[in-house]
Image (spheres, helix red, strand yellow):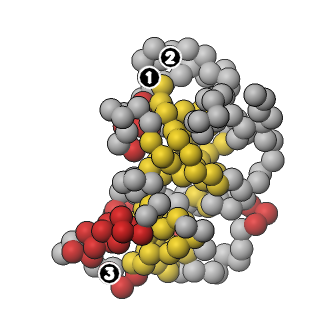
Amino acid sequence: MSFRPDKSEKAYRQTGKASWYGKQFHGRKTTSGERYDMFAMTAAHPTLPIPSYARVTNVTNGESVIVRINDRGPFHKSRLMDLSYAAAHRLGYVSNGSAKVLVERVFPVEGSERIATKPPSQQVAANDPLYLQLGTFSRLAKAEAELKKLLDNPAHIHDEKLAIINQNGIYRIRIGPFQRDNEALAMASALSVPPVITR
């Protein structure tokens, strides 16, 4: 089996199984030359550029993290990505060893703290509405259950902005629209979610 690293800025979106690697690799050199830190938010991927960034979502529970790709692997047909211990812990699958995840390449936006799911060449006009992603699920029932939890929270003051969007069989909970970056970033901070914002 061979893997050819992708050096482009293409969008990437794939669903598969993620595993994780822990203390037996802690301190060892990664492909990037950095030492592996099991407590950092990093990951290994067979082809995504080093360095690059990805949003990884556990499609069972909707939890997501942003990781920096700094290593190669896993080189197995059955696994899509190896995450650090810290990232796997945040996604809730350390005890299980692996989980079904959605991996989406993300791109830092110049002049902003937000992160986009499209490369700079495909990002659209700055005045288009922004949406903050709160969860991604493989089953509509789970997305609806999570949305109900959000709506039942008396502290939530933006119920009218919440919605479920079906994108090719993946159900995303998003909140918006927002007109400005700072509004969406403030909401991401208030809800303690990664600042992944789409148009």
Q: Residue tagged by mark 1? A: 22
Residue furthest to the left in view is 154
Tell me the CA gap for discs 1 and 3: 39 Å
Instruction: Identify which residue is drawn at 35% across, 42% down.
Output: 92
Horizontally, residue 56 falls left or right of residue 95, namely right
162 shown above or below 24: below
Q: Tell me, yes or no, whether the two marked residues, 2 and 1, touch with CB atoms within 8 Å.
A: yes
- Residue visible at 78% across and 29% down in the picture: 2
The residue furthest bottom is 160
SS assignment at label 2: loop
The residue shown at (53%, 73%) is 166
Q: Quadrant of residue 124?
A: bottom right
Indicate the secondary structure of the residue bearing disc 3. Answer: helix
Horizontal side of residue 146 vs 69, given as left or right? left
Kindly identify the amino acid type of the residue bearing the numbered disc 1: Gly
User: Would residue 85 appear left or right of 69 to someone viewing this image?
Assistant: left
Quarter that holds the C terminus = bottom right
In this rendering, the answer to whether 86 lies above or below 154 is: above
Element at badge 1?
A: loop
Is residue 5 at all visible to an observer of this figure? yes
Q: Which mark is residue 25?
A: 2
User: Picture coordinates of residue 144 (x, y %)?
Assistant: 35, 72
Q: Amino acid at mark 3?
A: Asp
**How many labels were placed on the picture?**
3
Specify which label sits upstream in the sequence, 2 or 3. Answer: 2
Whether residue 86 is visible here, answered yes or no, is no
- Along the horizontal axis of the image, is 153 left or right of 102? left
| Amino acid at circle 2 | Phe
